[in-house]
Image: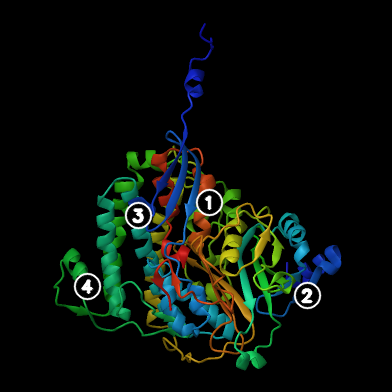
Amino acid sequence: MPLQVEDPRIVEFDVRTDEMLVNMGPQHPSTHGVLRLLLRTDGEVIHEVTPHIGYLHRCAEKIGENLSPPQWVPYTDRMDYLAGMNMNLGWALAVEKLVGMQVPDKAMNVRLIIAEMNRIASHLVGMGAYGLDLGTFSPFLYAFREREIILDLFEEVCGARLTYSYITPGGVTHDLPTSIPIPPGLAGLTGRNPNMTLSWIDACRMFLDWLEPRIVEYHTLLTENQIFIKRTAALGIMSREMAIDYGCTGPVLRGSGVDHDLRRDGEPIYTRMYQGYEFDIPVAPFEDAPPEAILGDNWCRFYVRMMEVVQAIRLVRQGMDRYASAAGEARIPFKMATKLPRAEVYLETECPRGQMGFYVIGNDRAEPLRARAKSSCFCNLSVTGPLCAGCLIADIPAIVGSLDVVMGEIDR
Amino acid sequence: MTAAEIHQNLVARFGSKVTGAKLDALDPWIEIASDAIVEVSEYLKTEPSLRFDSLNNLSGVDYFEPDEKKLAKFGHEPHVEVVYHLYSYEHRHSLVVKVKLPRWKDGKAGELPELPTVSGVWSIADWHEREAFDLVGINFVGHPNLRRILCAEDWIGHPLRKDYDFPLEYHGIRGR
């Protein structure tokens, strides 16, 4: 006689399939580089996710112990290669804190403009790639169109498009150029004469004037898109306690409702740069969130990034207004063979993906005894296991994508 | 709370387990005996006036100078340090805690020094300790999953040790 059950759904739950081990990556388009996830699944339901990292490991910290701080700057570019300027800045400030150096106002002003521009570029990629993870292609193309102009502007400043090595201990390598050819993308989008020349500041201002109204379009494309909301809202929910316990920082932390941003709450040597500037720190929950969204879910993390782009634009504008009146030089000399004092410092800065920390120990030599780079993505990724348990395979790209990790920084 | 106050607080509570401090440094640090690190960490995290709920960074440092010519100016006894950078979101203060370990357990080269894990206190310590084990070579006793994290699983040696020998080849790939 068949077993009688009152609730017909119980039969369905009793049907057990074998657990499967599914390998995802390291060459998987939605893992943002070379991340390998080992999934233990029961059908479609994930029981356990084990991230395997290290495919890009080159032991940059060991290299750092054999180079003087200015020589290690190019290696920091290659950590978070989408925000090379912010990586340079973190390292430069840590070294300046160690040797007790204060850069002039001009250098700080240029650093702020450049770092915030890189934040915009980085979040644009984060936004575009996240759309790509979820199956929509067009935001990615728009994001890269915009980013292209920022890269052109950076190229005029330092000659490189991705690995800048522009912000070094002592300031920045060059002042902003006074006359540059208009970036071709910008000329095309704004309908200017492609042969015109203008100052870097004017080109940047022209770009921001063009970019700012476009953000509304991204919101229509992604943020308010019903399919996007269905794929992100109420998924991958990270509580405030969990975010802090797993050392999550940056937009991931603020998406979980912790009001913390080092640009406001950091150490004086870093917050000095932002003194007198007006900017808001977007923190979840948001009033304009769709009703489906829950504090700490994918949607909140994504929206924090989008809002940060607006704030970064505000900061760059204010920075450019103060550029002309900023006192001092864009750099003060920092000799390649400067001996680092017998001391140790740890400094974190607010990078687009979180708080990047550098720990330097000097020992009366030009090369540090230890150059440690604490990666924000490393900590943000460590939460994947508990965050993905119990979700569906199709949600893995949505959750991992919302953490917005860059493997170059994790593997160092 | 300043580092000096925290130091007083810890000395009053743990006595001789607090083995040193440098409170006038750029980032003031407090040194703790290796066998007390878990109880001190738990205290630092749960004590309402301290509430160090975030472990920002955990790094291993190898103090050693393999070159005899440079040894005279090195100025440190050979040892390994584990450095914890803590932060409190509630009180917005930070602290550096250090633990000094011998370079090798019982002086036998190749035997990793042991330190109790704090992964039960801060979950992020799990990955940080795996990295410190992998690169610096510290055996975190009681760690739930102490495997290499950045280097390959069959890698030999701990690259951030100052006397690390670079391999000549790895699976047919030439090194050096």
Name the front one of labels 3 and 2.
3
Amino acid tagged 3:
Gln
Crowding near the residue tagged with mark 2, few <14, some 14–19, many ≥20 C-alpha atoms within 10 Å:
some
B21 relative to A218 in the view: left or right:
right
- Give the chain of mark 1: A
**Residue under numbered circle 1:** A383
Q: Are marks 3 and 4 on the same chain?
A: yes
Amino acid tagged 4:
Pro
**Residue under numbered circle 3:** A27
Cβ–Cβ below 8 Å for labels 1 and 4? no
Q: Secondary structure at mark 3?
A: loop
Q: Judge by depth and name the residue closer to the eye, B31 or B133.
A: B133
Q: Secondary structure at mark 4?
A: loop
Q: Earlier in the sequence, mark 1 or mark 4?
A: 4
In which image quadrant can residue A27 be found? bottom left
Q: Are marks 3 and 2 on the same chain?
A: no
**Residue under numbered circle 4:** A183
Q: Judge by depth and name the residue closer to the eye, A295 or A92.
A: A92
Q: CA distance from mark 1 to mark 2?
A: 34 Å
In which image quadrant can residue B126 be found? bottom right
Q: CA distance from mark 3 to mark 4?
A: 34 Å
Q: Quadrant of the N terminus of chain B?
A: bottom right
Name the front one of labels 3 and 4.
3
Check the image and report above or below for A283 versus A99: above
**Residue under numbered circle 2:** B20
Find residue A243 and report its horizontal and vertical position in percent.
Answer: 56, 52
Q: CA distance from mark 4 to mark 2?
A: 58 Å
Find residue B104 and report its horizontal and vertical position in percent.
Answer: 69, 72
Name the front one of labels 3 and 1.
3
